[in-house]
Amino acid sequence: MPTAEQLRDEELLSIERERAAFERRQEAFFVVHRQLLPFGNGVPSNHSLDELNDAEKEWREACAVMDRIAAEIRSGKRR
């Protein structure tokens, strides 16, 4: 069983990971948005779309970890 300190570290790391993933996703969205009309030529590059999809996936995975931790806290498994 992990110690309270290890659980807190996991919680903090999951928050930091979610925040970094959100910022990556946000930047990828802005890159795609700048390529759309009226700002760009209307056709986002495949690289930009791939980055947005990868960033979205990473963010959803980070959110899933945070959701799991929150569920453990609510159920009393974690304090």
Image: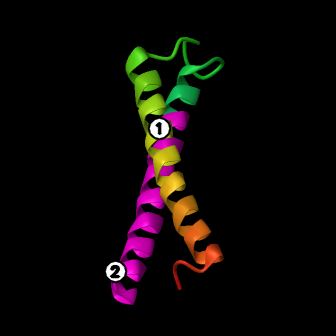
Label 1 crowd (10 A; few <14 / some 14-19 / many >=20): some
Amino acid on which the number 1 mark rests in the picture? Lys
Q: Residue 23, can we see it? A: no
Q: Please tell me the numbered disc located at residue 31.
A: none
Q: Please tell me the numbered disc located at residue 2.
A: 2
Is 1 positioned to the left or the right of 36 in the image?
A: left
Residue at 58% x, 60% y is 67
Is 41 positioned to the left or the right of 14 in the image?
A: right
Residue 46: x %, y % from top left: 42, 15
Above or below, 71 relative to 1: above
Q: Which residue is mark 1?
A: 57
Q: Quadrant of residue 10?
A: bottom left
First to last magenta residue range? 1-30
Residue 36: x %, y % from top left: 60, 19
Label 2 crowd (10 A; few <14 / some 14-19 / many >=20): few
Amino acid on which the number 2 mark rests in the picture? Pro
Residue at 65% x, 75% y is 74
Residue at 48% x, 60% y is 19
Mark sitting earlier along the chain (1/2): 2
